Image (cartoon, rainbow, N blue to C red):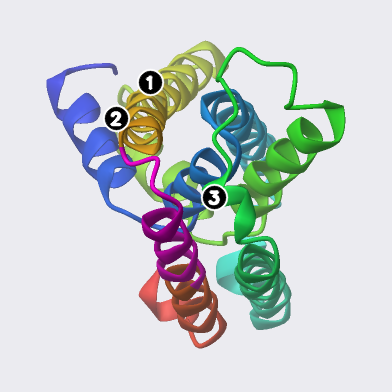
Amino acid sequence: MVNGAFIATVFAMVAAPGPSFMVLVNETLRFGRGAGLVTILGSSTGLLMWAATSALGLAALTQTSELVFTVFKLTGAAYLCYLAVMTVRNRRDFARQPAEESPARDAATLWRSYRSGLVTSAANPKMATVYLALIPQFLPPGGGTPADVVTLTAVQIAISAGWYAVVVALVGLARRLFAVPAVQLGLAWVSAAVLLTLGLRTAVMTSSTL
């Protein structure tokens, strides 16, 4: 069940930079901490979706069906590339410095950030391994009860959200400290390049790498 080994394993997986991490950083740099927190909510929703599909036995299709795996990976790859393009097109968002408490983050912006977190998480077939391979290792002998699975899943999502909240706070602080338009425009290009790289890497990913 929940022990030091489980917490350390989950944290190591979450802390490793990946698509969800980079999308979170990108949204926070563009729109501020509020948007970053909403992105976390979207990412957590995606994790809940993976947990539900795992419970229903559907998540296993990403490992047993090449077609399902390909659909998921190409959807995720296409969305990351789309975010890269939009980051470049709207790079001046990085140079704007509205007060974090201002009402500038309207509903459309928050929805965009939520959607970015949700789609990136839900379309990442690597998430299936968390619920198909990781969590079963820490269940009691015999497979445990549904309550055991729910507990481990809740802890995993809480660790993910907690770490990402720290990332949002740090990136939000850096966004305010380095409020130099030239620097922030440069960050936009870097962020877009990383998103594009992740998208291309996801596109060529194989099921054997899960």
Tell which circle, 3 or 2, labels the residue nearer the N-terminal end. 3
Q: Is residue 124 left or right of residue 186?
A: right
Q: Position of residue 8 (x, y in %)?
A: 17, 31
**Circles 3 and 2: CB distance less than 8 Å?**
no
For the point 58% across and 42% down, which residue is it? Answer: 96
Tell which circle, 1 or 3, labels the residue nearer the N-terminal end. 3
Q: Residues in magenta?
A: 178-192
Residue 46 part of the magenta-drawn span: no
Which residue has dot 2 on it?
A: 138
Q: Nearer the viewer, residue 210 or 74?
A: 74
For the point 64% across and 27% down, which residue is it? Answer: 38
Does 149 appear above or below 200? above
Q: Quadrant of residue 22?
A: bottom left
Q: How far apart are marks 3 and 2 (CA)?
A: 42 Å
Q: Position of residue 121 (x, y in %)?
A: 59, 49
Which residue has dot 1 on it?
A: 162
Q: In this view, does 74 lie to the left or right of 44?
A: right
The three-letter code of the residue at mark 1 reads Gly
The three-letter code of the residue at mark 3 reads Phe
Which residue has dot 3 on it?
A: 94
Q: Alpha-carbon neighbours of circle 1 within 10 Å: few (<14), some, or many (≥20)?
A: some
- Whether residue 56 is visible here, answered yes or no, is no
- Give the secondary structure at mark 2: loop
For the point 54% across and 34% down, which residue is it? Answer: 97
Q: In this view, does 148 lie to the left or right of 12?
A: right
Does 63 appear above or below 149? below
Mark 1 or 3, closer to the camera: 3
Q: Which mark is residue 10?
A: none
